[in-house]
Amino acid sequence: MINEKKVKLQKVKRILTLIFGIIFAILGVLFAFTIGVTDDVATIIEMSLILLCGGVAMIIWAKKRKKLINDMSEFMKILSCDENGCLNSISSATNRPIEEIKNEINKLIKLEFLQGVFIDESCNCLVKGNGEVNLKSRAYTSPQSSSKTESVIHEEENTNDKDASENQFDDGTILLIDNGASYNKLTKETLTFKSGKEIKEVNVSDIYNAKLGLLGVTITLKDNRQEILPTIPKDKYSVWVDAINELVQGKGNYTPLSHETIAKVKKQRKIAIGTAVAVLMLVVIGGLGIFTPDKATDNDYFEVAKILIGQELKAPTTARYYDFEIKAEDDYGRKIVFCHCDAQNGFGAYVQDTCWVLIDKVEIVDDSYKYTYSKINVIVVQGNADYLSDTYVSGMIKNESTWNQPFED
């Protein structure tokens, strides 16, 4: 019935998808950290979101596929003990709605993980294509009448009432879990559980009720204190809550935890986790604007050019700059700035200067400029020498061996 070859191939596909999903998600985050380093911010954001969303989608798919394969193994173990192949036995053992079980099995059949079987809707049984039940080649006999069918279903529904005590021992101890990381033990008198490194014990008589919250099973004491029981398997949530409330309020006087309540809490938990991840991403992306140095604009290059030109003047404090223009720019941020400057010469008379400055890099750190340049690339010519602009610009580029080359770290 189980297509082992198909299952093995699916396991390999799931692992590869998970690996690539993690890689894509990491690359998406790394791309986000390059915002502010390059000019094309829109492309970086788009690429980051594509990689991140694609990676998360692949991880979610791999997680769901793993759950489906694990569910199949669990279902088959349960059915191997049921000669009728009844799906109600799976529902009772896993504390999941029968419709959810049927949807899972139909998905397994559609993916060809299970072959040669189908669900008989008349009695919620898994049968072989030739009408045989389960794996035992036993002749399948459908109920003789609708009344008998109702009787069989009614009897199976009654077995659900035994779920709360299926893990109860003769000495009254029920639902004992001890895997090193967690410890939960419930008797008729006490509830013992692990809280951090401490083992706590409370009297059942001191418990007001038990309920299911976002973090799992929570008990509320009569003094309004709350405690969270550690690491309980999700399929045992209902059993724990029901068993505790049964002891606290008296047998038959509690309301069993419904499948709808468990589904609702699981949904709330997913929303809470999703919101936390989204907030974390916003904090990370927002933090980039705080820790990434501000990108220099043309005006910042003009301000640095004033500083460098001023070093060549006789009276820099008298200088008036105008007609700024970027004459050339390479792919890595080097720019040749052109401008005119009126300043006093050594005799106190104002003269016009024509200026060219090749600036390698400008960064803004703590509201001040950090820049690199070469002194030979600061040219100040007295008078109006605009006609020499092309000559000086081409000469600067020719003499600058690093022009259009990446900066060394």
Image (spheres, rainbow, N blue to C red):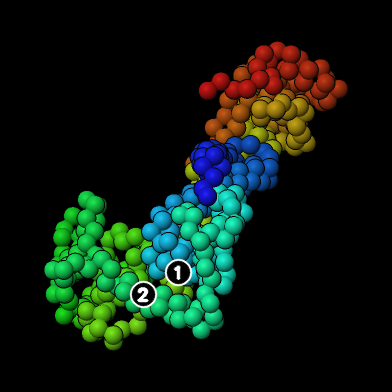
Q: Identify the mark nearer the N-term, 2 or 1.
A: 1
State left or right for residue 372 relative to residue 334: left
Mark 2, residue position? 159
Mark 1, residue position? 88
Residue 30, quarter of picture: top right
Image location (x, y in percent) of residue 318: 65, 35
Q: Secondary structure at mark 1?
A: helix
Which residue is at a point 30% across and 59% down the rendered structure image? 231
Q: Are marks 2 and 1 in contact (CB under 8 Å)?
A: yes
Image location (x, y in percent) of residue 227: 25, 69
Type of amino acid at the residue the image marks with label 1: Asn
Name the foreground residue: 107 vs 45.
107
Q: Secondary structure at mark 2?
A: helix
For mark 2, does the 10 Å Cα neighbourhood hold few (<14), some (14 to 19), or many (20 or more) residues?
few
Type of amino acid at the residue the image marks with label 2: Thr
Name the foreground residue: 137 vs 239.
137
- Quote the CA–CA distance across marks 2 and 1: 10 Å
Image location (x, y in percent) of residue 211: 33, 75
Image location (x, y in percent) of residue 407: 59, 22
- Residue 370 can be seen in this image: yes
